[in-house]
Image (spheres, rainbow, N blue to C red):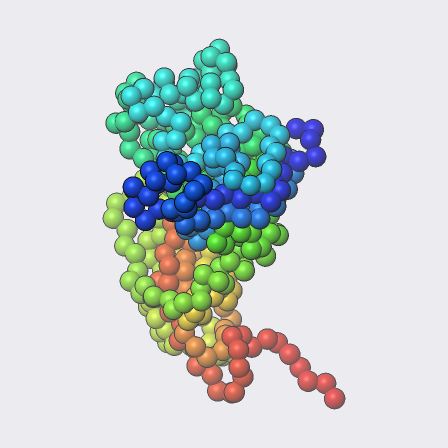
Amino acid sequence: MSSEFAIKANDLGKCYGLYARPIDRLKQLLLKNKQREAKVFWALSDINLLVRPGEVVGLVGRNGAGKSTLLQMLCGTLPPSTGQLQVNGRIAALLELGAGFNPEFTGVENVFMNGAILGMKRQEVAKKLDEILAFADIGDFVHQPVKTYSSGMFVRLAFAVATSVEPDILIIDEALSVGDGAFSRKSFDRIMKLKDAGKTILFCSHSMYQVEALCSRAIWMEKGRIRMDGSAAEVTSAYATSLNAGTVTPRLDSPTLTGLSPAGTGRIIRAVARTATQEGSEVDVESGQTDVVLEVLFQIDPALPAPGVAVGLSDANGATVSSATSVNDGVALQVDAQGYGKVSVVFRRLPLLKGSYWVTCFLSTEDGVHPYDQVTHCLRLNVKQQGLEQGVVSLPHEWLP
């Protein structure tokens, strides 16, 4: 796209009428403006947005914040109540599950129909049909009505069609959370290729890790408005802090592996915390004195590259205190012929101050973008200290005369 912008919105808003009873809606239609039977609800208001070609933008916010409403307006499936919206380029979108599919049509018939909706000629779709069906990988179900599909099969086929048309703008609204691990890996690989090709991507997700890994920019929406617009790291950090204002519910049971990991994915088998005198899911630590070892055992499909492992430490309020990732630290993990592996990270003289801290473990792809597995608050560190220092961590320091 040669335009200066891919998406431009000025004072965009969406208003709905809320009716106490169904008959009130009928009365409103009959009486028109003579009598107001509905309460006004603004799902979106004062949205000003400029997305440039090639930007990858993450959209975050709680359920009901207006994210899906905004994406539907950007796609043209929902008209705005106020404001102006300009979009330059071909849009492909994955919004509501099954959107754009006729449940009575077969998978192949829906591929051609979706291709037409996205502006492709039948001959163009026919040339890409084998590629689309191979990526979706739903077997003979492509010849069955899509009303017989599972949610995962819906997503596979919809994503394969949407990304095969080489869109200028790709919009994804949490659809990939429905697919299995193997498909999620394939889909994120394809998204990364579109990103590298300079396509514009809007990505809505509740995974702050994925948003930060995939996006250069993020927008935090709250109560129908843009609360924060900035770098992905800054926005996800601020949003995560707001989410973690409550109390954490700990999980101290270690996961147990039953059988091998499904093809194309991996899982965490067990996580252990260890000091010189203790080992288990909960250990006591002396601030600034105790070395703490966090060990993660995992298993991955042997056909895949060796994965990455990350650990995150959070305080009693759920706020992330620190993290460590094998990918960022340039550590290549080793796995055996069956895909089993083990890695440990050591925190020397743990500098955290008094309090209880939770450990969350992640298993990801080799580039750290897509998580295969996550075990939240599986370990607890009970930190004690001798002095009166306040805060979360004791930073290295010295006093000068």
* x then y, percent, for residue 51: 62, 40
Residue at horizontal 44%, vertical 25%? 161
Residue at horizontal 50%, vertical 47%? 44
Instruction: Name the one closer to the observer, 189 or 276.
Output: 189
Where's the N terminus, which quadrant?
top right
Instruction: Name the one closer to the observer, 93 or 316.
Output: 93
Residue at horizontal 34%, vertical 23%? 102
**Looking at the image, can residue 263 be seen?**
no
* x then y, percent, for residue 212: 54, 50
- For this orientation, the residue located farthest to the front is 34
**Looking at the image, can residue 10 be seen?**
yes
Residue at horizontal 41%, vertical 45%? 35
Q: Measured along the vertical axis of the image, is residue 134 above or below residue 224? A: above
Where's the C terminus, which quadrant?
bottom right
* x then y, percent, for residue 365: 46, 44
Q: Measured along the vertical axis of the image, is residue 311 above or below residue 285? A: above
- For this orientation, the residue located farthest to the top is 123
Instruction: Name the one closer to the observer, 286 or 2.
Output: 2
Q: Measured along the vertical axis of the image, is residue 381 above or below residue 385? A: above
Q: Measured along the vertical axis of the image, is residue 54 above or below residue 230? A: above
* x then y, percent, for residue 316: 41, 71
Q: Please count the marks in the image.
A: 0
